[in-house]
Structures are given as structure tokens and as C-alpha cells.
Image (cartoon, rainbow, N blue to C red):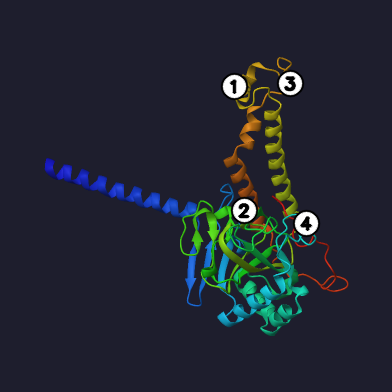
Amino acid sequence: MLRSYYAYITLSFIILSLNLSNSFLLRTMISTQVARHSLAHHATTIQVPQRNHADSEGYPSPLHFIHIKKMLSDEEVSKCLELAVSYGSTKWDKPDAARHTNYATCDFAVEDSPLLERYLEEIKFQDRLWKLINEDFDIPRDHLFGFLDLFCVNYVATNDSLSSDSTMDRLEAHRDGSLISFSLLLSSPNEFEGGGTFFEALRDVEPEGVLYPEGIIRPDRAGDMVMHSGKLLHGADIVTKGQRTILVGFVDVAGPKPGVLAKASTHWGRLDVAEQRYRRQLSMTETGQNHYKRSAQSQRFLPKYSNLKQIVPVIGMASARAESQFQRESRLAAEDELLRSALITTKISEPEGGFNVPIPVSNGDYTIL
């Protein structure tokens, strides 16, 4: 009887352990919130993890997904690259700061290259793109007005023969002035090393397939396209060998909803101020970081403005708000909230003068950090 009782206890403990283990795995899967789906026609979808855990309403929205798809055939992408290199070889020697004032790249506008523009029209590039955006982001065709910008970018490794002091091998993190953006790889992956588009929201996601460590997405064939919300913090990873040429587009989409972008911008701006305030207070100390530590530890005994050393002691809250992990999570939480509510899903009426009236934008990249 006693032996049966111990056997029962042992069995119960094993079952409990398995349940706890499964529960942990389930919680891990839920907290990660990353989904990948490969399709027969060469496509991958990556879901951006949820960051604002206090409120799950509206997550995930269509803008929480990054789509990697085959856009051009081998013949089409080869022709596009040929035309891009033919025209761009004299345009890629320095960043075009006149077109992109905030985050300039070595590029040229497609409209400036008649041959490339005409070829994209021949293969019905825009119609095919609109179809994919409608399918993947659930954006109606009448909410797609054209391109805020469409351009070819070239990144050159510093050890390449065409590298110079003015060429670029990467682009720092930024947000686009468009709700929907894409980058289409024109160069063969065999012609360069490194590169790809990194996303801050994917930096701590386990790499798999075209998703590499540090949140870098690298398509594995020329002609593949990465479609994403331009409001996701992203950039171009460093090219370490060869040259990487891409076609980039900022799509003119209805939205965002009034006030949504302003709210996120205000939050990001406050975080910028907090970081700058912290740095300023550190610079006002007499002995740098060591004095900052003493001031922070002694803050309850000192007035806000100390005459003891004629400095402003660093306040604990300032250092906490400037801490890198706090800054990152706060920025991503605001990004998450923006993605949930930015899209206009209701039918919109045509404005006076039609949809072709120029919309005032800052060259497609009124970029926000």
C-alpha cells in the first residue's frame, strides 16, 4: 500500500513537471509572438513581436508583418540591374542629400532613368506591387495613390575597388515617411557579403531562414522583395564585400489616422530629451562618471541644484530614463501602438482636385528616431 502511495506521488510529480514545462514553453511562444510562414511561391512572412503588453487590442495589425516575396523573375531582375548600373554608375559616387535630407543614400530616382522607368512600366511593376500590398496588408486599391519615392541605392564595401570616402556601405536606423516601404534586391547574393535590412524590433528574435542574428533580413535571391511598414525602425546592414544594389520604394498610402503619428512622435521626442538631459548632466559633473555615481547615491541629501560643487547632480530618474534598455523598450512600445492604429480601413472620399494633387512631404523621409 505504501509502495503504491509513493508510486502515485512520483507519477503526480512527473505529470506536474511536464505540465509546468509545457506551460513554460507555451508562455515562451506567446511572449515571442513571431510567426514565419513559407509558401510554395517563395515567400516568407515574419511577425513583429508585441511590445505593449499592457494592451493587446489590435495586435497584430497588418503592419506588424514583414513580407519577403519573389517579385521579379531572374530575367526581369537581371535587366533591371543592367539598366540601373548603366545609369547609376555615375550617380552612386556620393549620397544624394538634395533628395533625402535626413538619411541620404547613394541613389538615383527611377524617374530620372527613362530606360529603367519604361521597363518597369512594361513588366507592370506597379500593378503587381499593388496586388501584393492589397493581399498582404489588406489595403484597398483605392488607398494606394502611387510612390512618394522610387529609387535605386548602391552600397559598396570599403575594401571594394569602387569604394571612396563618399560612397556608403550601410545606413543607420531610421523610420521612413511612408506607411508602406519596400526594398527589392537587384544584385545576386553571390556578388556581395553582409548587407540586408535590419529591424530593431526583430533584434532579439531567434534567427531562422532569411532572418539573421541582430534582426537582419537577407533575401536569398535577386528579385526578392522585403515589404514592411516604413514606421518600423530599420536600416541597412554593413556590406563587407562587393556591392549591393537595391530598388527602394516609399508607397503613398491613405493615412495614417489623424493624431496617431503625432502621438508616437511626441513619445519618441520625450525619450530623446531624457537621453540628452542625462548626457548634459553628466557633462556638468567635475569628475565624470565617478562623480555621477556619488551624486546619484547622495541625491536624497542634496538639493536639486547643489552649490556644493556648483553642479546639477544627476537625478536617479534621469539616468533610469536614459538607460539603453528602457529607451529601446519604450520606443518599440510606441512603435507597436502606432502600427496597431495607423491604417485607415474605412472608405475614403476623393478630395477636391482628385487624388493626384501633390501631397506636401519631405522627399519621402520625414524621418523620426
- Residue at image point 69% right, 73% down: 140
- Can residue 252 be seen? no
User: How far across and down, in percent of the image, does residue 26 sit?
Assistant: 41, 53
Separation (CA) of disc 4 from disc 2: 26 Å
Depth-wise, is mark 4 or mark 1 nearer the camera?
4
User: Residue 257's quadrant in the figure?
Assistant: bottom right
**Left or right of 148 on screen, residue 7:** left
Separation (CA) of disc 2 from disc 1: 35 Å
- Can residue 24 be seen? yes
Pointer 3 local density, CA inside 10 Å: few below 14, some 14–19, many at least 20:
few
Pointers 2 and 3 in contact (CB under 8 A)? no
Q: Secondary structure at mark 4?
A: loop
Label 3 sits on residue: 305
Disc 3 marks a residue whose amino acid type is Tyr
Separation (CA) of disc 4 from disc 1: 43 Å
User: Residue 309's quadrant in the figure?
Assistant: top right
- Residue at image point 35% right, 47% down: 20
Q: Secondary structure at mark 1?
A: helix
Tell me the tag on residue 336. Answer: 2
Disc 4 marks a residue whose amino acid type is Thr
Reading the chain from its start, which is encountered first: label 4 or label 1? 4
Separation (CA) of disc 2 from disc 3: 38 Å
**Left or right of 55 on screen, residue 109:** right
Pointers 1 and 3 in contact (CB under 8 A)? no
Q: Quadrant of the N terminus?
A: top left
Separation (CA) of disc 3 from disc 4: 40 Å
Tell me the tag on residue 297. Answer: 1
Label 4 sits on residue: 101
